[in-house]
Amino acid sequence: MLKQTEGSHAVAEAIALCRPQVVCAYPITPQTHIVEGLGEMVKSGELTGCEFINVESEFAAMSVAIGASAGGVRSYTATSSQGLLFMAEAVYNASGLGLPIVMTVGNRAIGAPINIWNDHSDSMSVRDAGWIQLYAETNQEALDLHIQAFRLAEELACPVMVCMDGFILTHAYERVDVPSQEEVDAFLPPYAPRQILDPAEPVSMGALVGPEAFTEVRYLAHHKQLRALDLIPALAAEFKRAFGRDSGGLLRTYRTEDAETIVVSLGSVNGTVQEVVDEMRARGTRIGSVSICSFRPFPLETLRAALGHAKRVVVLEKCLAVGLGGIVSDGVRKSLSGIQLKGYTVIAGLGGRAITRASLTRLFEDAERETLEPVTFLDLNTDIVNHELERERQERRTGPTAEAILRRMGTVASRIG
């Protein structure tokens, strides 16, 4: 059924169609509308057979999800930013125990300084926690990925994180196609747990494992992710046959067949990137783009095939590895081992800064001229940065950097030297 709705509400409807038995929730912007929507559906009786549990923290939310999943029921939660960091210990426990929990991350920057807007700092901070990470480009894909996520999680006994850009997607109203309950039931069978805590057949879960077996346990978690490299595209293909549209998979290419420059990115920014690609193509520039959906596991071979014929690759990242540069770029470089082409990392959109067509056009033109720095910060205000560096050089007691910059920009009504 086609309807105009908010991204968060679309995801809430998708989760409800997957028949969760436990939803544990703690609100944090910008994912709050998802769990609010699910709570309303449980209270009204629209979503039956589900217990909605209000918890006192994000750590408690993941802990409840772990307990519910270990008890043999389909479990779901959602979080963002500092909330994800607060539950980090339990996030590792969920994957270490092989529990097929599905969680939405409404991507948001991590403070300090405090920032509620979108970038990918939160989910990237737990990229190696053992969860599959899928990134949605549109609200339709966010809806579809959650339906695929439960199937993927339960076939592999591995938790899945569906990441959607905070505010850009979570709060945007778009037309989406919401499937029927019958369609989802045909794609997603009832939950049949691989392991369960049953008093009639007691077992231990999460037991102490010493050096004699820990490597093997971790290898098997790694092996699940490698299996997912085959299962993710297989489920996407099955989803297309059942629902009639492309969603998910490992990655998608756009006008890359003869491209000399290829842009690689994750999430909603791909829509803007594709618009710029079209504009530059109309002027004769051979450029294309790749949208990565599966960041964990990382699609090394598939990406290598998509990029191998290009002259240069620009990796557009909405996260910063402080002291290093890019995060996604590391996977891209590994996929291109032995292939000689120019590679650039571009840090963009941190803390919700707009990524405009004009800025991307200038960026891609500089890449074509090969005048970019290996690590570039899109639209960096160098005057502000240089002033702050000079102030720090001259003064021992400089005070908080963030507040000094805001005063310099006139955002805070006070004076700095």
Image (spheres, grey):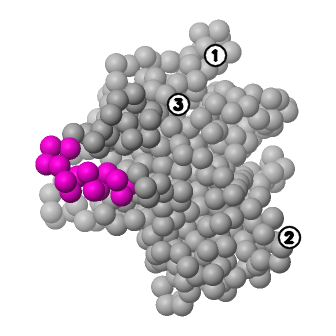
| Residue density around tag 2, few if under 14, some if 14–19, many if 20 or more, within 10 Å | few
Location of residue 203 by image quarter: top left
Q: Is residue 181 visible?
A: no
Q: Nearer the viewer, mark 3 or mark 1?
A: 3
Q: Label 2 vs label 3: CA separation?
A: 37 Å
Residue ID for mark 2: 282
Q: Give x and y (percent) for residue 130.
A: 39, 54
Which residue: 77% across, 35% down?
174
Q: What amino acid does circle 2 point to?
A: Ala
Q: Is residue 73 above or below residue 348?
A: above
SS of the residue at dot 3? Answer: loop
Q: What amino acid does circle 3 point to?
A: Pro
SS of the residue at dot 2? Answer: helix
SS of the residue at dot 1? Answer: helix
Residue 53 numbered mark, or none: none
| Residue density around tag 1, few if under 14, some if 14–19, many if 20 or more, within 10 Å | some
Which residue: 65% across, 61% down?
360
Q: Label 3 vs label 1: CA separation?
A: 19 Å
Q: What amino acid does circle 1 point to?
A: Met
**Image-based side of 362 in relation to 325, left or right:** right
Q: Earlier in the sequence, mark 2 or mark 3?
A: 3
Residue ID for mark 3: 30
Residue 41 numbered mark, or none: 1
In terms of secondary structure, what is the magenta stretch mainly? helix
Q: Quadrant of the C terminus?
A: top left
Given residues 85 and 355, the one toward you in this image is 355
| Residue density around tag 3, few if under 14, some if 14–19, many if 20 or more, within 10 Å | many
Q: Is residue 288 visible?
A: yes
